Amino acid sequence: MKEVIEINIYDKRANSSTTICVEKLSENVFKAVKNEIFNCRLTLGTEFEARLNNDGFYEIVRIIEDSEYTTRRFILTSQFTESEYRLLGDEIIRLGGFWQTDFGSIVTINLPRNCKLNLDAIFKEFDFHPVEIKD
């Protein structure tokens, strides 16, 4: 595994900046090791080229390789307890996926592209209708 570092990213399109954890693959090539909550292009496993600007922020030049995961984001509700949500998270991890929670109520789920876990069927079975955040 390559060295994991935090870099500051500036997105010209959104006129915003954020910090993201990445593997540094070469001088200007990085791989996201988590999902960036504000920039939906930078999900777990996405490789990208970036250049350092005069303000010390990296600006994305191009996406080199998209993530091998299917990524979905939802707003959680208090309908279930944290331990009940964790059961789903444990199953996602068991199947080779990844999940993270940001701000206590936004969950990002990464599933391998060939994963047979059907989130929509699980949500329907438990009468759970979370709001999905679309890019």
Image (tube, helix red, strand yellow):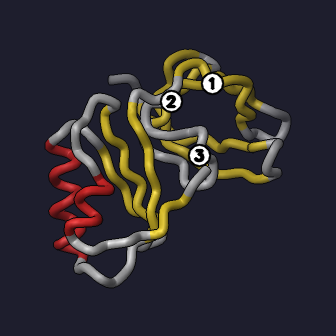
**Which residue shows up at 63% across the image and 24% down it?**
63
- Are the residues at dot 2 and dot 3 in contact (C-beta closer than 8 Å)? no
Residue 108, position in %: x, y? 42, 54
Which residue type carries mark 3?
Cys
Q: Which residue is mark 3?
A: 40
Q: Where is 93 relative to 87, above or below?
A: above
Looking at the image, is mark 1 or mark 2 earlier in the sequence? 2
Residue 97, position in %: x, y? 27, 41
As drawn, the residue found furthest toward the top would be 26
- Are the residues at dot 1 and dot 2 in contact (C-beta closer than 8 Å)? yes
Task: For marks 3 and 1, give the CA distance.
Answer: 12 Å
Q: Where is 131 relative to 54, above or below?
A: below
Q: Label 1 neighbourhood size at 10 Å, few (<14), some (14-19), many (20+)?
A: some
Q: Which residue is mark 2?
A: 46
Quarter assignment of residue 104: bottom left
Q: Label 2 neighbourhood size at 10 Å, few (<14), some (14-19), many (20+)?
A: many
Give left or right: position of 37 versus 18. left
**Which residue shows up at 38% across the image and 71% down it?**
129
> For this rendering, which residue is in front, 71 or 16?
71
- Label 1, secondary structure: give it: strand
Q: Which residue is mark 1?
A: 63
- Label 3, secondary structure: give it: loop
Which residue type carries mark 1?
Ile
Q: Where is 81 relative to 117, above or below?
A: below
Q: Where is 130 relative to 98, above or below?
A: below
